[in-house]
Image (cartoon, helix red, strand yellow):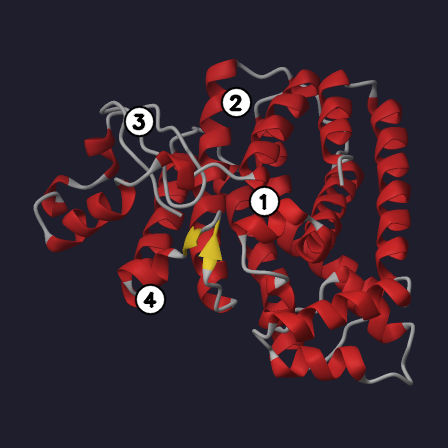
Amino acid sequence: MVCTFNVPSQIEFLGVCYLFSSNRKKLFNRDIQNSAFFVFIEVVLIQDKAHCSGAAAETQQLLDQAFNYWLNIPLDKCSEIGEIVQMLHNASLLIDDIEDNSKLRRGVPVAHNIFGIASTINSANYVYFLGLERTLKLGHPNATAVFTEQLLELHRGQGMEIYWRDNFLCPTEQEYKEMVKRKTGGLFGLGVKLMQLFSSNKSDFTTIVALMGLYFQIRDDYANLQSKEYTENKSYCEDLTEGKFSFPVIHSIRSNQGDPRIMNIIRQRTTDVEIKRYAVDLMEKMGSFEYSRNVLKELDAQARTEINRLGCNKYLIAVLDELKLW
């Protein structure tokens, strides 16, 4: 969640390493540079690089570069848009960790457990508006409309997920997919749509963006409950502690409606490792992980077909090849 200054022009921000192209002092209005708020932002920003980079951030950067193979906009414009998306992603992680009551991110305590909830929320909101400011400076009349709509979609999707969790309502698979299209696809789509404003290529990328977003989220849900690397970076099966209706959890509940065990464990929001191990074993026996793997294979195939339809993109294929390691 937190980062280091290596040179004056470099800021690695809150959870995912991110480079600003301008001098860091320009990020802040001169009127507040000596205020307590400015000091707080500096303290939050100046931390260990090891806590910064994450799979989602790296994937987003690769996606931006891959889509530019099709869109072919100037590299400086592509870089600027990539930085804007990265800012928003970083800020959303701060809010997500508060909303999910997370304890760890990338193996270290979450920001709000170090700096406090109020300051973390304020910092995240501040960065949202920094992103808007930089979007205005892109110089396209439709850029802010794209920014606004994609951020609205992200929050609509997040709201759906929170509503299900807090009311113990297990969504259908189709409802889950609609939520992901909004939540994960909101940021995935932002970069592509902003880039397309400056491109002569007006192809419809809606389907491939939705497929990539869904693939990434289901893969993340699967990894949270299955991946050894993931459990070393986050507390063991944290999605169960959060009471999250992730993709494997939805399958286990929906395909075994006469069996209340998984729903009862979700309701507990337990931190007990043995109970969580029992839940994972149960979902394995119910076929939920096998089902998730099969859906991932299907999404991978659909994405590759759509890429070929749009005009083969070796960089996007490389992203899929990398993501296939689950």
**Looking at the image, which is closer to me, 109 or 169?**
109
- Residue under the point 90% across and 30% down: 305
Residue denoted by label 3: 10
**Label 4 SS:** helix
Of badges 4 and 1, nearer the viewer stands 4
| Image position, residue 238 (x, y; %) | 59, 63
CA neighbours of label 1 inside 10 A, class few (<14), some (14 to 19), many (20+): many
Of marks 4 and 2, which one's residue comes earlier in the chain?
A: 2
Looking at the rendered structure, the kind of residue marked 1 is: Leu
Looking at the rendered structure, the kind of residue marked 3 is: Gln
97 sits to left or right of 14 = right
Q: Cα distance, mark 2 to mark 3?
A: 18 Å
CA neighbours of label 3 inside 10 A, class few (<14), some (14 to 19), many (20+): some
Q: Residue furthest front?
A: 274
Of marks 2 and 1, which one's residue comes earlier in the chain?
A: 2
Q: Cα distance, mark 3 to mark 1?
A: 23 Å
Q: Cα distance, mark 4 to mark 1?
A: 24 Å
Of marks 3 and 1, which one's residue comes earlier in the chain?
A: 3
Of marks 2 and 3, which one's residue comes earlier in the chain?
A: 3
Which label was assigned to residue 117? 4
Q: Cα distance, mark 2 to mark 1?
A: 15 Å
- Residue under the point 63% across and 73% down: 243
Which label was assigned to residue 187? 1
Decide: is 47 above or below 82: below
CA neighbours of label 4 inside 10 A, class few (<14), some (14 to 19), many (20+): some
**Label 3 SS:** loop
**Label 2 SS:** helix
